[in-house]
Image: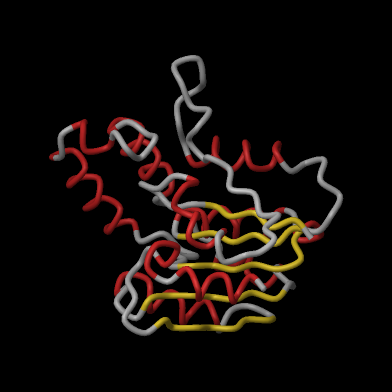
Amino acid sequence: MKTILLHGLGQTAQDWDGVLHRLSPSTAECPELFGEVGEDRPELSYGRLLSDLEKRYAGTEEPLLLCGLSLGAVLAIDFAVRHNDKVASLVLIGAQYKMPGLLIDLQNLIFRCMPGKAFSETGISKRDMIRLTHSMRTLDFTGQLSGITCPVTILCGEKDCANLRASRKLCGMLAQPKLRIVPGAGHELNKCAPDEIAAALR
């Protein structure tokens, strides 16, 4: 089985290092979701990220274990909906299955007020960050979740208020779910609770 770790918005593949160090030996892949985006590429959007992910694993014959945080979890859900036959299991962290449009609009308003240099370590420019989040605001997998038949582990930090409710509701909409609320943890579990993720991946 091939394990794929998909980072969140504002993160890079290096944010999985704590998890990788706990997987021995590790065969997990951590693609840089924004790494290939440049001036010669089309404008960054959610559709572009999904298309890149599908192309990257189109020829993979072994079953996939997709583990994603936040944006990565959304991509993992979407990929599993579209390619259920290729996905053996999912680990979803701080996941939303229906994008909160008003929250995204508020987030983008905050982004517009931030200086461009604040985005320098995210691998994505301020303009692309705003464009990407706006392109996600109408995503809704509610009617497609029943098509995900593989086992799904849902992780959410106890202090991740924005995603706790969605995680609990998501658990009730899947065929083989397991929900784990991580005590005292926030949103970025790959940074603050890598042991929990490593245990779920094992």
At 53% from the left and 71% from the top, the residue drawn is: 197
Left or right for 24, reference 165: right
In which quadrant of the rendered image does the C terminus lie? bottom right
Which x, y percent locates residue 173? Answer: 58, 79
From the top left corner, tell me how far across and down residue 146 is, in percent. Answer: 67, 73
Q: Between 85 and 147, which is closer to the camera in this rendering?
A: 85
Q: Position of residue 183 (x, y in %)?
A: 36, 85
> Is residue 106 depicted above or below 150 in this figure?
above
Please identify the residue farthest to the top as the structure is shown: 40
Colour convention: secondary structure
Q: Nearer the viewer, residue 73 or 166?
A: 73
Question: Which is nearer the eye, 50 or 173?
Answer: 50
Residue 177: percent from left, percent from top: 62, 81
Compare residues 159 and 130 and report the one nearer the observer.
159
User: Image point 69% across, 60% down: which residue?
Assistant: 25
- The answer to whether residue 127 is above or below residue 164 is above
Q: Is residue 131 left or right of residue 68?
A: left
Total count of labels: 0
Residue under the image location 84 percent in, 54 percent down: 62
Which image quarter: residue 31?
top right
Q: In the figure, residue 64 lies in which quadrant?
A: bottom right
Horizontal arrangement in the rendering, residue 196 relative to residue 189 (left or right):
right
User: Where's the N terminus, which quadrant?
Assistant: bottom right
